[in-house]
Amino acid sequence: MTVTSRNPRAASSPTILPGVDASTLTRGLYSTDASLYRIVPEGVATPRDADELAALVDAALAAGVPLTLRGAGTSCAGNAVGPGVVVDVARHLTSIRALDPEARTADVDPGVVQDVLSRRAQRDGLRFGPDPSTFTRCTIGGMIGNNACGPRALGYGRTSDNVIALDVITGTGERLRVDARTDLRTSDSPTLRALHALVMANLGLIRTQFGRFGRQVSGYSLEWLLPENGFGVAKFLAGTEGTLGVITGATVRLVADAPAKTMVALGYPTMPEAADAMPAILPFRPTAVEGMDARIVDVVRRTLGESAVPALPEGAGWVFVELVGEHADELASRAADLVASSGCLEGWVVADPAIASALWKIRSDGAGLAGVSLDRPAYAGWEDAAVPPEKLGAYLRDFDALLERHHLHGLPYGHFGDGCVHCRIDFPLTQADDGAAQYRAFIEEAADLAASYGGSMSGEHGDGRARSELLGRMYTPEALDLFAAVKQIFDPRNLLNPGVLVDPAPLDADLRAPQVRRSPLFRADPQFVEDVHRCTGVGKCVSASLAGVMCPSWQATHDEKDSTRGRARILQEMINGTLVTDGWRSAEVHEALDLCLSCKGCSRDCPTGTDMAAYKSRVQYEAFKKRLRPLDHYSMGWLPRWGRMVSAVPLLPQVANFFMQTPGLSTLVKKAAGVDTHRGMPRFAAGSRRAAARKEFDGRPGTKGEVVLWVDSFSDAFAGNHVATMAAVLIANGWTPRLLERKACCGLTWITTGQLDGAARELRNATDVLHPYAARGIKIVGTEPSCLAVWKSDAAELVPEDPRVGEVAAAVMTLAEFLAHDPTFEVPDLSGHTIVAQPHCHEASVMGWDAEATLLAATGATVVKVQGCCGLAGNHGMIAGHYDFSKAVYATNLEPALDAAGEDAIVLADGFSCRTQLDDLRGLQALTFAELLAAHSA
């Protein structure tokens, strides 16, 4: 390893340390967190238990190897990147060792996720109080490292307020058990004795400069060590960002929510005027006070539609307040008094939980969209400064003026009750040669501004590499010397998270975005480069609890390389070119993309709109351009072509089925086609299903008008009654179905195998066939949701020169969408039935599943909507080597839903691949929506 002046030590390779992965792929995955910074580690460790973690720390200290601890990797300030070895505690150190409801405590591993702990504690009416926006994936260890807060820290405290005890290994190798319930002032620990002596020698300095207001998170929180605070070492260590010790276990406090809760929504002329109201609002004991203005609201409305923004009180700046209490009457009175005292233009007490949830969602949606809603990419960097709440209004006015002076833009919002403001800013890091210099100039002025209001560089995310250099702007030189003295006691060789807090790296060193400007791909295809860098690392794709489709591969493996974020990191490294060096053909890129199901879940569920399916197609296109492709690209990538050929020749379907279904012969066919030999093979139909349905149903007169029934290549070529049933349902409801004479393939299989030229060719042909109907205002109902999704997503990108594509896209829809707009359509009564519904990933992600959900709810059935992917995902689960992985994805959501519903449940799956997976893995014949209606019609 390279020896630097910041980390003087003997040269040593991390590969000699236990359990360290020094592969290029893994180093690239961990080269950055959710910040602006890129530092390629020399290895990554994922210890399986506390003993392995301790052994790793001992070995690193003995070899002089720097260590940086990482939880979920969602740090916004560069707290979780560093040289040497990055230690990922989230992979395996996830045990809740004990939970005591009476004492309201929990003993946890550092990698336990906040949401997992809270959901476990909810069985006993408890939860972990601090709730950052990343609560579905942030770890308790990471929260302790950064002293994380979240919106409800106002009521439940920061993480430091909720830490009781820590097990720590210092940079000297000493094991410490620091417990707030034990008097540590008489400890025989050399570390604690030296720390206590240092504190006692600096009482005046600590009392005057530390603990001035709640969100003074920057630097070391030395106030916890004062005699009046009981020499609280455990609480002091929260917020030290892994620079003083490695946490191997923690005991944390749990809290109980009050039984009564209400929301108050207040409107003001501007956001600064809303902030001015904090002295009037805070005496009413809120648990959360969140502020925003019309900029955030407009972004949500523009991006997610009018329905995403419910009615708001009059004004252009808003404060949402949460109040809790033991008694509803007292709470209602307190809420009404708050409105009367707030000085707002208009205020509402929102007692309806559904309306309150919709209003809170504006805030959360806007926060997620803030980084991708400006004309230029917006970045962290000045992400979470805080000032005393009574000074917040004046600070916001000056902050907006500072942005304007630097010709920058942002969308401020935040925890106004704590004086903490979040803002992603469109620094010109890739647009200008001096982007880094412009970044530094703004950050230095912003730091001086916050300090002038008695504020903190960080209010909850920690200082990391983004703000450690700035500590001298809010602390005296004597305070900085005290930080260094503490560091010397705990980590005299500066091996723990070097470059952070003490002896900090420059804030403009190791910035990731400016390095992109040196990439040839940046000049050749800046749009692709920008798209890949949409991923900022916030990590919704690695959430412990699934609330959408994204990311099924990570849910199955829990491996960083199989997450949307991990794949984006490797693509970013490919663009950078200094670590991943073979461009589109880099082995690391293809390994990271191998288990991507191309489900498009990230395109909808990721706050930044990352579309990994599109990026994977582009990589495959470039990598195999004018080269021999894998076998499955020809067999399954050209499947519509083979299907048409088989269907067109009499008796050929029967011959093909003989070879595909006969043991032994089937294995040979699968190997020749690049199909996994464990897979069953679908059966070809005895001729085109489209042609048969056209002969039987086309043109049957109805009273409501014509509708085109667009039959996809799968439904056309393979066995099943799906096409005929859909035609019959349309006829039964008074419509005249029109079935096409000519084939119209969307090119989906060409897209998923990266054969984009072929996909565009298929789409142009399909446009020629379908557009005449769309131009006449005739709706086009498709039999396969994934093919419909192509028109709504990929088609415009593949055939951008043809405006007719957009007209076809507007005309195509699912059967449910079509019937939902038919005022005379009546759903069957399915009361007493349970329906397990597996939406196709592409439909759920691109078009949404609202129409199906609405119609199914109207049937009276109990509907269980499966989150995530079935695991087959078109051709992906058929590819040789993917079978076990496909089964693992199936086992994460779909299989448990089926098991819970029981054998009598109706299973609904419109996607051909979903039905194929259910048949192959469970021997279950799922119904399409049309078949469900037909089977239960009067």
Image (cartoon, rainbow, N blue to C red):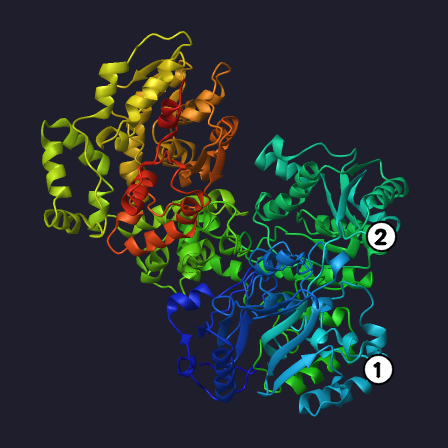
Name the element at disc 2. helix
Circle 1 SS class: helix
The residue that mark 2 highlights is 282
Q: Is residue 115 visible?
A: yes
Q: How many angstroms separate mark 2 from mark 1 (CA)?
A: 30 Å
Residue 611 in sight here: no
Circles 2 and 1, Cβ within 8 Å, touching? The answer is no
253 vs 420: above or below: below
Indicate the position of residue 911 as horizontal and vertical percent values. 35, 36
14 to 909, vertically: above or below: below
Q: Position of residue 366 (x, y in %)?
A: 64, 44
Q: Which one is closest to the eye, mark 2 or mark 1?
A: 2
- x then y, percent, for residue 716: 24, 28
> What amino acid is at disc 2?
Leu
Number of marks drawn: 2
Q: Tell which circle, 2 or 1, labels the residue nearer the N-terminal end.
A: 1
Type of amino acid at the residue the image marks with label 1: Leu
Q: Residues within 10 Å of mark 1 (few under 14, many from 20)?
A: some
Assign the N terminus to one quadrant of the image.
bottom left
- Residue drawn at 83 percent across, 79 percent down: 205
Give the quarter of the figure containing the C terminus. top left
Q: What residue is shown at x 49% (from left), y 77% (from top)?
A: 84
Residue 883 disc label: none
Q: Which mark is residue 203?
A: 1
